[in-house]
């Protein structure tokens, strides 16, 4: 009997040696004359257990991990390929607590299937959403997405259905679907995981978007830091073309949709939608004034849907199971699920898809297992480099867009970076300004100049120079940037800075009382 | 540094391949850099003429993007992540270690032309920080020992 073994091909798994493990298992099976079929699946996102090797049995898939190349001979000695136990045995993969406690909707297939096997994709409910959508009037597709309560998962949390409605209602002979895959926020990797581990779900979401708003051309604007995702997406697009999911007369209908990947070039600002469009047009990624909204005048001046990877990849399950099914998850106006990415100084890091409403505390301690170093967690930054630093006193907050904005924080793209007690928050605040100075497009003054002045003011505060005056200046600068910047780059950089100052004044060398100016 | 005949020919081929592509500059610069290792400033007049753009527009475009380089690089590119998640796991120390061990700063190349050191802001490997990328390969949970291994590997390769 042939044993079926799964070894992930996700880039984080590869960064921990999954390729070497694959080669060692292949070689060992040949040396031992064993019939073994190896599938290169995606990662389940349990990165603390990667490289996670699975073996198919009649009870389900059994997991072993984290596997090092040096473990391979002993795995074979104990006949792991027959599902027998080994010191790295983790039991049935689906029963691993970390995974079992999740609600996987967008990530339903991630880690289970071979990413570029379209038959596998179809077997696990792939293209069901599209097949429902092509039978509907475009207005009804938009209504379904609106009713699901899906909001932009890239960070801005704007209702996806409303954006689509605007594009649908704007008459034009040419419209575009643009996928923002310029996932530049530190602490986030959920877009990368979808693109590498289940690329067809993104393709399906983009086709549905095209049908819904009347667009026949799509672009995936992919950051250049993701060479592996680029290769996977290009393969998947070619396969989808061969199967007539892309191209002309999709599945025998009158709908046409072309899709291509455009490589970005390492500018963080191009994650801002108007800057992204400028870049796609072959220009410097300078932020545009709004209005006009991209939904009315977007790429080459045409109505354009610009959505994040996760927003688009969530559309297929909404069209498959219905708006009500999706909206049933979550709390308040934060409907559905969010792929949460645990990063930084935590024992157990990885991707957790959960309904909105879970608290930071549960994520950091129940899932994350506390800090990796064993020291107390001092602060977390949620939502990327423009998100506020939250102290332990705020860890009871549930993940909910509105609850976060009440405390001047953002859920953003769902990335959570934890810092232990050794972190110097003034250094991180200074870094926020430095990052803004490096990445600013330079169009508006508060962002271009404010970021550099901000670094200087922090240096003065830390050196004890006229502290009271400089703290006031720092707060003034923060207000100017928040109120006067053209986009979120300059407009949100003060969030991490001011939160660091408010909650950790001692790191700036100042007493608490002086900071409340 | 003057372009060789072969380099000019390659640039001209890429320029003509993207002539009818909307937003051509982005894929064009990638093609040139993938091929030659950098985007030579001497390519600007060729592009300028073919695409009816000013040299200033092309220069402005290339220098806006961190990914594009206007000077040749070493045989290998080591990119060290400087973003928050890596900082939370001792990325600063890895950064210093790379600079000290290689004896170069960011955007510089070792004397033997083996490694160019670059900063990068997030590799999407934040679950296994600190991270670096050597050419197209991401390495997670990087230690000083792993940096030594990477450097050794590039030496053996060359």
Image (tube, coloured by chain):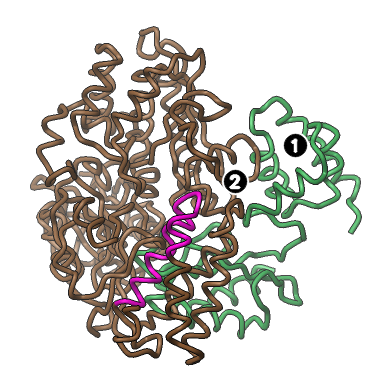
Chain colours: A brown, B green
Image quarter of the N terminus of chain B: bottom right
Position of B55 with respect to B28 (left or right) is right
Position of A283 with respect to A208 (left or right) is right
Q: Can you give x and y, in whole percent of width and height, for residue B70 in the image?
A: 76, 57
Q: Which residue shows up at 59% across the image and 57% down it?
A: A445
Q: Is residue A511 above or below residue B55?
A: below
Q: Can you give x and y, in whole percent of width and height, for residue A304 in the image?
A: 46, 28
**Residue A53 visible in the shown view:** no
Quarter where residue B75 is shown: bottom right
Q: Element type at marker 1?
A: helix
Q: Chain of mark 2?
A: A
- In reply to whether residue A426 is colored magenta, the answer given is no
Q: Can you give x and y, in whole percent of width and height, for residue B41 in the image?
A: 82, 52
Discs 1 and 2 lie in a common subunit: no
Q: Is residue A253 above or below residue A75?
A: above
**Which labelled disc corresponds to residue B14?**
1
Q: Which residue shows up at 79% across the image and 36% down it?
A: B53
**Which labelled disc corresponds to residue B91?**
none
> Which residue lies under the disc numbered 2?
A286
Image quarter of the C terminus of chain B: bottom right
Q: Can you give x and y, in whole percent of width and height, for residue A197 in the image?
A: 34, 45
Inter-mark Cα distance, 1 to 2: 25 Å
Circle 1 Cα neighbour tier, 10 Å, few/some/many (<14 / 14–19 / ≥20): some
Give A270 or A156, whichever is nearer the viewer.
A156
Q: Element type at marker 2?
A: loop
Quarter where residue A285 is shown: top right
Circle 2 Cα neighbour tier, 10 Å, few/some/many (<14 / 14–19 / ≥20): many
Give the tally of numbered discs.
2
Q: Which residue shows up at 71% across the image and 66% down it?
A: B74
Q: Nearer the viewer, mark 1 or mark 2?
A: 2
Task: Magenta stretch: give its range.
Answer: A479-502
């Amino acid at each position: 009997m042939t044993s079926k073994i799964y070894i992930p091909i996700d880039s984080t798994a590869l960064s921990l040696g999954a390729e070497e493990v694959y080669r060692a298992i292949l070689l060992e099976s040949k040396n031992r004359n064993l019939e073994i079929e190896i599938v290169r699946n995606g990662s389940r996102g349990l990165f603390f257990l990667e490289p996670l090797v699975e073996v198919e049995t009649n009870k389900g898939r059994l997991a072993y991990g984290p596997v090092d190349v040096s473990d391979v001979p002993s795995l074979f000695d104990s006949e792991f390929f027959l599902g027998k136990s080994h010191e790295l045995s983790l039991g049935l993969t689906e029963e691993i607590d970390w995974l079992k406690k999740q609600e996987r909707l967008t990530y339903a297939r991630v880690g289970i299937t071979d990413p570029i096997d379209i038959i596998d994709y179809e077997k696990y409910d792939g293209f069901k959403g599209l097949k429902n959508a092509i039978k509907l009037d475009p207005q009804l597709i938009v209504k379904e997405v609106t009713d699901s309560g899906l909001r932009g998962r890239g960070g801005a949390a704007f209702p996806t259905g409303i954006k689509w409605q605007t594009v649908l209602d704007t008459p034009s002979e040419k419209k575009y679907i643009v996928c923002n895959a310029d996932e530049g926020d530190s602490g986030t990797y959920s877009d990368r995981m979808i693109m590498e581990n289940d690329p067809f779900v993104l393709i399906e979401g983009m086709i549905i978007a095209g049908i819904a708003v009347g667009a026949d051309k799509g672009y995936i604007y992919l950051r250049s830091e993701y060479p592996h995702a680029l290769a996977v997406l290009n393969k998947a697009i070619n396969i989808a073309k061969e199967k007539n999911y892309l191209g002309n007369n999709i599945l025998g209908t009158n709908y046409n949709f072309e899709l291509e990947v455009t490589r970005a070039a390492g500018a963080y600002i191009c994650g801002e939608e108007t800057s992204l469009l400028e870049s796609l047009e072959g220009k410097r990624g300078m932020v545009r004034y709004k209005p006009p909204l991209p939904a009315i005048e977007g790429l080459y001046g045409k109505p354009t849907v610009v959505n994040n990877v996760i927003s688009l990849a969530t559309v297929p399950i909404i069209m498959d199971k219905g708006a009500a099914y999706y909206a049933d998850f979550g709390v308040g106006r934060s409907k559905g699920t969010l792929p949460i990415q645990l990063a930084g100084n935590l024992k157990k890091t990885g991707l957790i898809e959960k309904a909105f409403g879970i608290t930071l505390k549960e994520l950091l301690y129940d899932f994350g297992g506390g800090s990796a170093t064993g020291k107390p967690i001092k602060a977390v930054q949620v939502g990327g480099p423009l998100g506020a630093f939250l102290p332990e006193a705020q860890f009871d907050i549930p993940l909910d867009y509105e609850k976060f904005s009440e405390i001047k924080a953002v859920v953003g793209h769902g990335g959570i970076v934890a810092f232990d007690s050794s972190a110097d928050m003034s250094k991180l605040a200074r870094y926020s300004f430095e990052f803004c100075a490096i990445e600013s497009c330079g169009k508006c003054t508060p962002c271009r100049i404010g970021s550099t002045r901000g670094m200087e003011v922090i240096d003065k505060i830390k050196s004890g120079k006229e502290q009271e005056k400089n703290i006031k200046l720092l707060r003034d600068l923060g207000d100017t940037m928040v109120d006067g910047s053209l986009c979120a780059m300059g407009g949100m950089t003060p969030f991490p800075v001011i939160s660091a100052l408010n909650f950790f004044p001692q790191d700036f060398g100042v007493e608490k009382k002086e900071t409340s100016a | 540094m003057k372009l060789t005949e072969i380099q000019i020919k390659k640039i001209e081929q890429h320029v003509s391949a993207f002539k009818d592509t909307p937003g051509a500059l982005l894929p064009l610069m990638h093609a040139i850099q993938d091929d030659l290792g950098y985007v030579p400033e001497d390519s600007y007049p060729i592009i300028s003429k073919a695409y009816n753009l000013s040299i200033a527009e092309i220069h402005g475009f290339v220098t806006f993007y961190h990914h594009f380089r206007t000077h040749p690089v070493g045989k290998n590119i080591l990119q060290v992540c400087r973003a928050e998640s890596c900082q939370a796991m001792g990325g600063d120390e890895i950064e210093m270690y790379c600079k000290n061990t290689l004896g170069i700063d960011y955007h510089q190349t070792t004397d033997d032309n083996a490694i160019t050191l670059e900063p990068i802001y997030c590799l999407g490997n934040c679950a296994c920080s600190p991270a670096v990328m050597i050419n197209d390969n991401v390495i997670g949970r990087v230690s000083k020992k792993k940096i030594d291994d990477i450097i050794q590997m590039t030496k053996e390769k060359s």
